Structure formats: C-alpha cells, structure tokens
Image (tube, helix red, strand yellow):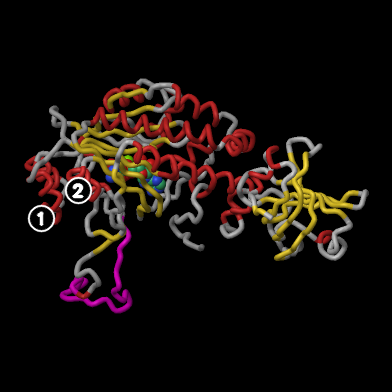
Amino acid sequence: MEKITVRKARLAETIGQHVCLQGWIRTRRDSKGGFSFLEMNDGSSLANIQVIADQELPNYADEVKRLSAGCSVTVRGEIKQSGGKGQATELLASEVLVHGWADPESYPLQKKRHSFEKLREWAHLRPRTNSFGAVMRTRNQICRSIHDFFQEQEFLYVHTPIITTSDCEGAGEMFRVTTLDLDQVSRQAGQVDYACDFFDRPAFLTVSGQLEAEIFACSLGKAYTFGPTFRAENSNTSRHLAEFWMVEPEMAFCDLSGNMDLAEAFLKRVTGDVLDRCQEDMRFFMERIDNEVIDRLRRIVESDFLRISYTEAIDYLERSGEKFEFPVAWGADLQAEHERYLTEKKFQAPVIVYDYPRTIKPFYMKLSDDEKTVRAMDILVPGVGEIIGGSQREDRLDVVTARMQEQDLLPEDYWWYLDLRRYGTVPHSGFGLGLERLVQFVTGMTNIRDVIPFPRTPGNADF
Ligand code: 4AD
Ligand code: MG
C-alpha cells in the first residue's frame, strides 16, 4: 500500500486508491452511528484529511475512541469521495495504528488558540500549529525561489565563511568567537593575548558574506551567498534578530542602476512564486493575519518600484507634516519611522532610496562624483521597512583606501580586498536581503520571531 501525503490524499484524483497516511490527530468527533471522525494532519498542507474510523475496527473501543489532539497514527484505508464541505476526499480506515499518545490533560496544543508570544515558549511544539506550519511552508518556497532565480540567471552559489576576522559593516556589532577560557584569560600588560587564542587573533561571527562574495564576483562574474549572519546589536524590535539568514548576490560589470533592476526583478519573482504555489497558506494569512497581504503581493508583482534619492526622501519627510520621534535632517540616517512613512503612507508601495550621505554608510560603497554621497540603495516595503540594503562597490584603490582611513579601519587588515582593486578592478555591485524580513513581508506576520524556527534575540537562546 503506497504511503502518500495528506496534501495528495485531498486531491480528487486519488479517489478509489488504497493508501497509507501517517501524521498527527488534530481532533476526534464520535458519531452516534457507531464511527468516529478523525482530523489528521502531516504538515504537507494546511488542511487536514478526515478519517472515518468505524466501530468494526478491532481497536475501536480501546484505542480509536481515546485518540486526542497530538496523538501520532498510521492509517491505512481507501480514499472515498467526501460529502463534507470543503473537502473532495476522505479516508475510510481499514486500520488505525497508534504510535504515541498525547495526554489531553497536559498537551498544550488543545482547541484553545494561543498567542504567538505564548507559542514562542514552546518552540518545540509550535510547528504543529496551523500558523507556524503555514509560515514554514512559505519560508521553504521562498528559499527555493531564491535559488531558482539566481541559478536561472547563472549566478554561482558560493559558501562564504561564518567565522571571520573582518567587520564588513564596520558597525562593531559582532559576536566574538574564542576558545580562551574567559575566567582565566591570558593577559599581557593588561591586554588579552590573542596569540593564545584559536585563530591567533580576534575572530567573530560574520555580519555579512559580502566581502568574500566580492572575491568571487571579481573572479567568476556573478555569485551569491545565502547563509546565516549574526549581529550583536541590542535591538529588541519586531524586525531584528541576532541570528538571521541573508541572501547576497554580487555582480561584476554592474552599476547601481543594474543592481536596483536585479533587486526589483528578484523580489517580483519570489513574491510571484509564493502567490502561485502557496495559495492555501496565503489564503490563511489573509484570513487570519493580515487581510491585505495578497493584494500587497500582487501590487509588488505588477507595478514598478518607485526610485527616489535620499535627498528627495529627506525633502518628502520634511514636508510631510508628521511628528517624528527622530529629527529629519540631511546627513542623518533614516529611522524605521521615516522609512515606514515613505513606503506605507506617502507612496503605499515599495520604494528604492538611493545615494545616501557618505558619512552614514560603510567604506565599501562607491563615492559619487559629488563626493557627498555614495552609490547606496535600500529597498523599503510596507509593513516591514528596509528589506534590502546594497550598493555599487568602490572599485578605485586610492578612494577605497582613503574611505577605510576615514572610518578608522586599517587598510593592511583588508589587504586582500584592496588586491581586488589592484589587479583587474571592475565596476561591481550587490545587495543583501534579510530572509526573515522577506518572510514577514510575504506572510504579514508582525513579529520577526515568528518567522524563524528558533529566534535568537537579546537574552533569548532557549532552544
Ligand atoms: O543593510 P545591511 O546591513 O547590508 C549588508 O549587510 C550588506 N553587506 C549587504 C550587501 O550589500 N551584500 O543588511 C542587509 C539586510 C537588511 O536590509 C535587512 O533586510 C537584513 O539584512 N537585516 C536584518 N534582518 C534581521 N535582523 C537583523 N538584525 C538585521 N540586520 C539586517
Ligand atoms: Mg541596511
């Protein structure tokens, strides 16, 4: 007897087949007619399959009638056409095998709906809920589309290191990696002696794979890295994690406008794929999480992204008449409230802001001819704010060296990065997309902690 998923078993084409299904019970309802309805789910779809278990089953009285939410079962039987609403099929059981019981007195996921905050305390059980299952299936589709998009465009997938000795973003928000015994740190003249440490020098968890991705773009043309990144910023917000996944494409012979074109095509492709392939889960998000989420995704696919310079953005903000917590002034970084005003109120659409002041951006961004701005771009989307950050890279040896010095970085620490400018330098560009912010945007989930299996935030690494 073939084992199939609940998703498949729900298709009318399976009617008449004898199959085996394995999963977990969601509910049991006993009918007066001497049989029970079991709602069963195996994670392959949001919807359950209804199992009809008759009293003729040998373990009906002893076992079937004791089944409750969370019990694991194997059910064999025939797929029948269903008379029930919202389902084409049901499974008439010839055998119900119980693998594991779940005491209804103590199993937390009973009928009652729990808040997302509460579910975070049960990171080991929340994948059994409808909402988290839908988020994880959507996240999976997004990752698949990310690879499809770049592979189809002949980008090379490179694995950049997780342990690094350079601070890409220059923000100093890095987690340290050490084997030194912190209780007995070896010090010389009051300084930690890193010669005794594993890597003979200070090492950290990476904040971005960009610098290494540049190496591959400047050798092999187009590359992307996709992996975990780490930031020790102490921000307890609904959009920040200490550990998150970032996709970073990097392209040789590409300027800022080509970079913006790629980023826009990329977001359109991923959201389009989700609309096509995650219809059931998207309907759930629309009904339960955010009733505008599908319309918003459709608009992403259909309309061009607006592109405005930082200077224009400041102008719009100054003339907005809004009371912002952080003052708006040319030269200051855009805060989340400013970004959200632009994308949610002013334009109600994705906005690409480009050409930011040099003083607020990292050393690697290409200096514009005005020498006041760099060729940076951020993409802002409703509900989330900044989802992508990128730039054209500074490809001139003298300028990038000066920019490092300006930001108190030692050029000798980045000798290999400078070599890329010394030998066969090329205009090149790239960006970084925060995977979890994209999952938030696509699903409408308001807290970033609810779109990653095991969120790491200040004071929280429990699971
Ligand atoms: O804007 P960021 O800091 O850019 C970079 O790291 C560049 N090196 C990327 C590149 O050009 N290759 O980060 C990129 C994106 C942000 O737009 C945001 O979506 C996400 O990463 N991000 C975070 N997501 C969750 N939690 C955090 N703490 C994040 N910090 C950044
Ligand atoms: Mg950024």
Question: Is 303 located above or below residue 201 in the figure?
Answer: above
Ligand 2, what quadrant? top left
**Quarter occupied by the N terminus:** bottom right
The amino acid type found where label 2 is placed reads: Ile
Q: Which residue is farthest bottom?
A: 184
Task: Tell me which residue sits at (64%, 50%) in the image.
Answer: 4
From the viewer's perspective, is the residue at label 2 or at label 1 nearer?
2
Q: Is residue 410 left or right of residue 243?
A: left
Q: Earlier in the sequence, mark 2 or mark 1?
A: 2
Q: Which mark is residue 412?
A: 1
| Residue position for label 2 | 215
Q: Is residue 194 magenta?
A: yes
Q: Are marks 2 and 1 in contact (CB under 8 Å)?
A: no
- Which residues fall within the magenta stretch? 174-195
Question: Is 305 located above or below residue 416 in the figure?
Answer: above
Task: Tell me which residue sits at (25%, 40%) in the image.
Answer: 222
Task: Tell me which residue sits at (22%, 59%) in the image.
Answer: 165
